[in-house]
Image: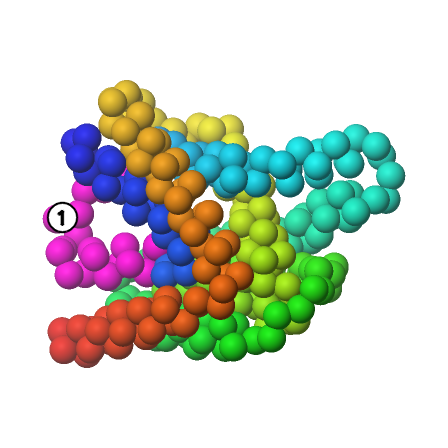
Amino acid sequence: MNNLDAFILGVIQGLTEFLPVSSSGHLEIGKAILGDTSVPEESLMFTVVVHFATALSTIVVFRKDIWEILSGLFKFKWNEETQFSTKIIVSMLPAVIVGLFFEEELEALFGGNILLVGCMLIVTAVLLWMADRAKNTEKTVSFSNAFVIGVSQAVAMIPGISRSGATISTSVLLGNDKSKAARFSFLMVIPLILGKIAKDILGGELTAEASNMSVLVIGFLGAFIAGLVACTWMIKLVRKSKLSWFAIYCLIVGLIAIGFSLYNQ
């Protein structure tokens, strides 16, 4: 992987982590169109670095929120911050369970099944379209809402289902305030990303092959900068009910993917 590839992959990771278009689905489509050998394979180290950059960009954007949450936690009271943190933990449970017990089944879905990706992109489009037309409220995410949103995050492990799109749409369709729904969606992914990174490090899965420091640094910068832009932009789009743009995009790409799959059968 050269520096240009690293920067492009980093930017793609930073953008698609927050924009509701499914990064995994686009990667599968790209591999199918270009051929597996034409797409540079990301080393595990590079993957860990760009995911860390994405998590860090989220922390920067929500630094005030995170500081308030941490400050409230250290008061050791059942206050608003403690309740919010507990909701984040509740939202993580479905994805953790699916990741631990169905890892092999999930990996099997990433074998170039473009028909599946196309269908799931259309599902994402429908969710975004419905959420865009939901009435805005002042309601905050409840504990039961947190679990349901967590289920949607677990479902988003399927290629073609956007994580941010599924979680924000689910939250909005449950009647929550759109800005608060986006805030919860982005904050809930930080522990999962950091947990996955810790698992890879402690599991000794990182190899020395990805020791090209320039590639790692450039990939990190690309993902971090793109993450800052996409996260901030997405919050504004959700608040202004502009998710239908992404719904149309996902519908078009989904139909193209289905057509491509059927044509090449």
Q: Residue at x 27, y 42 (%)?
A: 9
Whether residue 15 is visible, yes or no, is yes
**Amino acid bearing label 1:** Thr
Q: Residue at x 59, y 68 (%)?
A: 172
Q: Is residue 221 above or below residue 137?
A: above
Q: Residue at x 49, y 72 (%)?
A: 132
Side of 52 relative to 6 (left or right): right
Residue 81 location, x and y as percent?
A: 76, 43
Quadrant placement of the N terminus: top left
Residue 218: within the magenta? no
User: According to the image, label 1 marks what residue?
Assistant: 37
Q: Is residue 233 above or below residue 105?
A: above
Q: Residues within 10 Å of mark 1 (few under 14, many from 20)?
A: few
Q: Residue at x 83, y 32 (%)?
A: 75
Side of 13 relative to 253 (left or right): right
Side of 55 relative to 118 (left or right): right
Magenta span: predominant SS is helix
Residue 175 location, x and y as percent?
A: 66, 71
Side of 93 relative to 203 (left or right): right
Residue 35: within the magenta? yes
Residue 230 location, x and y as percent?
A: 40, 48
Magenta-highlighted residues: 23-42
Q: Is residue 217 above or below residue 247?
A: above
